[in-house]
Amino acid sequence: MVLQVASGIVASLARPQGVQTLRAAPTPSANTRVDDTQAFTRDRQSVLAAGKLSGEIAALNSGKAMAEEGARTLKAADDGLVEIKAALDRMKTLAKDAKSTKYSDVEREIFNLEFGLKRDEITDIVNRTKYKGTKLLDGGGGSELSLAFNVGGGTASEDTITIKIKAATVAGLDAGLATADLLSVANATSAETVVLAAIDQDLGIRGQVGAYQEGLHGAATNAEAKASFLGTEKADRLELQASADQSRFFSNEVAEENGIVLQGFQILADAKTFNALIETISVDADGDASSGETSPALNRTNALLAQSAARSLSAPSVTLDI
């Protein structure tokens, strides 16, 4: 290999295989300071954008958690309504039997006793159907319980889902259920009608709860998808900014120090050493290769490179592609 010096331009250099060219680094432009200011502005914008995305992602994750919390709340309410339906089904059977003329008044008294116990069971179910201490089927002390869940993480009205659960108390299911009895055929017939209406009311409340559950599940899925999308966008922005920062750093380092770039080789060098190499070195590669001896010029090259390495702490570090 040959290092030829002509008019201060290096054409080739004897060094490890794969190293192809040696070229001087570009001179800094007059607009370097303006470019740096613009780059700093872009950096600030990237940081602000990433911070905004982080906030949006956190809000969406919070919304997803709230939607899931709401779905669990409604699941507890639905479980209670299923139990109430089972009690009402038994009350319907008792009323149907009691209205039959084949049973005596004594037997109707027995039916009526169980009928009353099932009615009390409904009250017990309402009182113990809770989620985190909140009764879900008592209507909030009135006719309807209202609960709000922020599923979007924001303050807009569409970020909140408000659910309303009608009271599934004895009185809430049907006004006549509290006083119904089976002590006579007529009373049993009337009681059966009341119980059937109560069953319809229970099923209606369950249908309402189920619709709210679907809405909350959908909100949780949407929030998760949006958070994932924004997370990918944030990662992409940060990766691109990191690449731009690295490229700008090495470009500025080489240009400001008037260093050199060796493609395919990593070296520490400064402008003084580089100029000395250009001005003084000429190596006949054929002569060196055949004799196996080290020429004075090559010795001087090695000495200059050693000096460059000694000054590596202050010299620019440049990279370099093969």
Image (tube, helix red, strand yellow):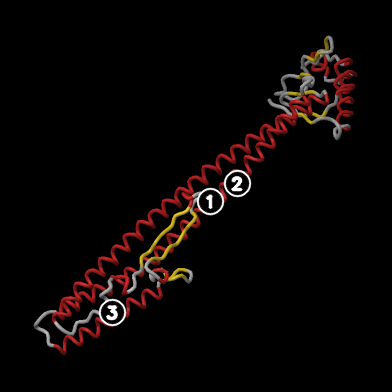
Q: Position of residue 164 (x, y in %)?
A: 39, 61
**Could you tell me if the residues under marks 2 and 3 are in contact, i.e. CB atoms within 8 Å?**
no
Report which quarter residue 244 is drawn in: top right
Q: Earlier in the sequence, mark 2 or mark 3?
A: 2
| Number of residue marks | 3
Mark carried by residue 54? 2
Task: Classify residue 100 by image quadrant.
Answer: bottom left
Q: Amino acid at mark 1?
A: Thr
Mark 2 or mark 1: name the one nearer the start of the chain.
2
Q: Nearer the viewer, residue 188 or 9?
A: 188
- Please report the residue visible at 32 percent of the width from the left and 76 percent of the height from the top: 122
Q: Quadrant of residue 2?
A: top right
On screen, 128 above or below 8? below
Q: Nearer the viewer, mark 3 or mark 1?
A: 1
Assess whether mark 1 and mark 3 are in contact (beta carbons under 8 angstroms): no
Which residue position is annotated with label 3?
Answer: 118
Mark 1 closeness class: few <14, some 14–19, many ≥20 residues within 10 Å: few
Relative image position of residue 58 (x, y in whole percent): 57, 50
Around disc 3, counting alpha carbons within 10 Å, would you say few (fewer than 14), some (14 to 19), or many (20 or more)?
some
Q: Are marks 2 and 1 in contact (CB under 8 Å)?
A: no
Cα–Cα span, label 2 and label 1:
17 Å
Front: mark 2 or 3: 3
Q: Is residue 49 left or right of residue 74?
A: right
Pointer 3 or 1: first along the chain: 3
| Amino acid type, residue under disc 2 in the picture | Ser
Does residue 292 appear to the left or right of 99 in the view shown? right
Q: Please identify the quadrant where the N terminus is shown.
A: top right
As drawn, which residue projects farthest toward the top?
A: 7
Q: Which residue corresponds to mark 1?
A: 155
Q: Quadrant of the C terminus?
A: top right
For label 2, the crowd category at 10 Å Cα-Cα, with few meaning under 14, some 14 to 19 and many 20 or more, is some
Q: Amino acid at mark 3?
A: Lys
